[in-house]
Amino acid sequence: MKLNKAQKSFKDHMFSKVSMVENPEEEFSNLFNIGKIPLDARLKIYRNHIVTTLSNVLVMNFPLVEILTGTNFLKTAAKLYLFDNPPTEPCLDRYGNSFPEFLANYKYASHLPYLSDIARLDWKMNETRIAKDDNSLQRSDLAEIAPEAYETIIFKLKKSVRLISSPFPLDKIYSLCGEKEDNEDVLDISPEKTYILITRYNWEPQIRNLKESEYNFFLLLQEEKPLGIALEEILKNYPEFNFVDFLQNYIELETFSAAITK
């Protein structure tokens, strides 16, 4: 059996039902030497190690979900998820990108309609944490751009910046999860539209509430719309939008990496 076929066969056995491990295919069994420990027992050890490792990875990558639901709940969901969603790359920090979608359809989480959005927040914060570092745009960089070129400016967001919106108060849930002491107050998690910017400071994700107009303007910038076009679109729907204040605030927060002109 060729190496790539052997590797695929091993992966298929590890991420299959237990019955396939207990009764491996003959061609696959022939790859292993007969030893004192039966092959099915050895395969179960490998399989359990993989399940335990990937379950722990998902717990680490979704800390807010763990706080809200408990470790046992999360690990149970993780084990169901991982068999249909094996890793596709070596870096396990990037494992679990479709887990929020899984939770949205997970019947045992149906009483927690906000959980999948909290998982999305977890994932975006994880992406912010592991993103490559890049330079921050400075006010002095803008001073070098000729006024007649302002409308063509494309503001590049830093690689670590993420945006998320939700019909639930993610900011309040996030704050609750961060409290070190038990809080007996009942949090109102009724629908409340939330817009959040995630940035990084000292390699740790920071969340900041946005106005709806700011969020939608960031989306336009994320699409790399030239400034003139982006402002025209945003002012059409939000005439009160103040671009000068917006720019000053988010340059100070080191949200942009560059301002380029075409």
Image: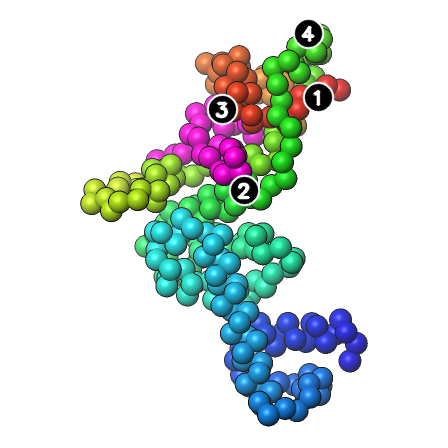
Say the numbered circle drawn on residue 147: 4
Kindly check if marks 2 and 1 are in contact, taking CB atoms under 8 A apart as contact: no
Residue 102, compared with residue 227, is above or below; it is below
User: Where residue 112 sits: x, y (%)?
Assistant: 34, 52
The dot on residue 148 is: none
Q: Which image quarter holds the N terminus?
A: bottom right
Upstream in sequence: badge 2 or badge 3: 2
- Mark 1, residue position: 260
Of the numbered discs 1 and 4, the one sitting upstream in the chain is 4
Marks 2,3: beta carbons within 8 A = no
The amino acid type, in three-letter code, at marker 4 is Pro
Graded by Cα atoms within 10 Å as few (under 14), some (14 to 19) or many (20 or more), the crowding at tag 2 reads many
In terms of sequence position, does the residue under pointer 2 or pointer 1 come before the other?
Answer: 2
Judged by depth in the image, the label closer to the viewer, 4 or 3, is 4
| Left or right placement of residue 71 versus residue 187 in this view | right
Q: Residue at x 31, y 42 (%)?
A: 179
Residue 125, x across and y down, in percent: 50, 42
Q: Is residue 71 in view from this perspective?
A: yes
CA separation, marks 4 and 3?
A: 23 Å
CA gap, disc 2 and disc 1: 26 Å
